[in-house]
Image (cartoon, rainbow, N blue to C red):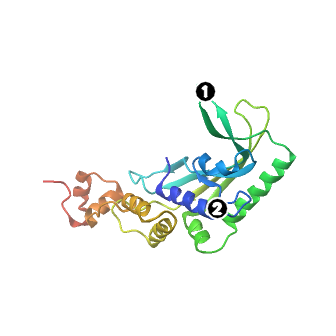
């Protein structure tokens, strides 16, 4: 499970990479859109798939939105083609298949890797700047070849794993820092007002009174908050 900030970094990265490499606009979130590749049926093509599932955090108390966090942005790069595959039932489906690698594929993948890293960390402009605001520090980069889990012949694929420190998620019920308004504006421009509304509702939630907000930020129970007289309010209930 990834934080909202790690998700934001992934979505911004997808926009940055679209059109920035030999893969063109074939940059996908979490899975290849096979239907979008049908016009390339039978022809070799390159794709990039991004995901951000792995994240760890060292939390103090119950402050689950903060702490020292490390997230992983996974970028899968592959050269393959869409083929029609017949199932045992007799039905046919469209499937993106990745062949074994060769010298030409290795050259292509190496170029795309370089283009990918350059676009993410050497770019300029508002979108590149927004990405850097959510990726506050890069902890490490791991590159892997496309090899089956049991080993053997290498496939025409690469995996880039970027470990980074994401921006902290906003506290529940608190006012949003300006960077989050910038992200929501980015989402609306990319995916429309409905998607923005969905993400904004998750980020903002319901407004929380100052005294209760302080209780949540400190991770206190109502009894603990009442004993500490947080915000000068009686938070111990009736």
* Residue marked by disc 2: 18
Q: Is residue 2 left or right of residue 213?
A: right
Between discs 2 and 1, the one toward the N terminus: 2
Q: Residue at x 50, y 69 (%)?
A: 189
Q: Is residue 49 left or right of residue 152?
A: left
Count of numbered circles on the image: 2
| Residue 127 point in image, percent of width and height | 58, 70
* Residue marked by disc 1: 90
- In the picture as drawn, the residue positioned furthest to the bottom comes out as 125
- Of residues 106 and 94, the one nearer the viewer is 94
- Of residues 123 and 27, the one nearer the viewer is 27
- In the picture as drawn, the residue positioned furthest to the left comes out as 238
* 10 Å crowding of disc 2: few (<14), some (14-19), many (20+): some
Q: Residue at x 64, y 61 (%)?
A: 18
The quadrant holding residue 100 is: top right
| Residue 67 point in image, percent of width and height | 47, 55
| Residue 223 point in image, percent of width and height | 23, 51
Q: Is residue 83 above or below residue 110?
A: above
The quadrant holding residue 129 is: bottom right
Q: Residue at x 80, y 53 (%)?
A: 108
Q: Is residue 84 left or right of residue 223?
A: right
SS at badge 2: loop
């Amino acid at each position: 499970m990834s934080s909202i900030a790690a998700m934001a970094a992934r979505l911004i990265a997808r926009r940055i990479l679209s059109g920035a490499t030999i893969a063109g606009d074939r940059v996908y979130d979490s899975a290849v859109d096979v239907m979008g590749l049908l016009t390339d049926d039978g022809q070799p093509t390159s794709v990039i798939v991004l995901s951000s599932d792995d994240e760890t955090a060292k939390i103090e108390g119950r402050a689950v939105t903060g702490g020292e966090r490390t997230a992983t942005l996974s970028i899968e790069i592959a050269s393959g083609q869409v083929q029609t595959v017949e199932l045992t039932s007799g039905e046919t489906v469209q499937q993106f298949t990745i062949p074994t690698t060769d010298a030409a594929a290795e050259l292509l993948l190496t170029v795309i890797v370089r283009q990918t890293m350059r676009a993410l960390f050497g770019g300029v402009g508002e979108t590149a700047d927004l990405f850097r605001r959510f990726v506050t520090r890069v902890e490490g980069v791991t590159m892997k070849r496309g090899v089956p889990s049991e080993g053997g012949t290498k496939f025409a694929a690469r995996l880039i794993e970027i470990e980074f420190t994401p921006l902290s998620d906003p506290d529940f019920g608190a006012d949003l820092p300006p960077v989050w308004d910038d992200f929501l504006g980015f989402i609306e421009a990319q995916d429309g007002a409905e998607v923005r509304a969905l993400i904004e509702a998750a980020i903002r939630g319901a407004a929380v009174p100052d005294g209760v907000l302080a209780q949540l930020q400190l991770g206190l129970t109502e009894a603990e908050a009442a004993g500490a007289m947080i915000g000068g309010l009686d938070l111990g209930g009736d």
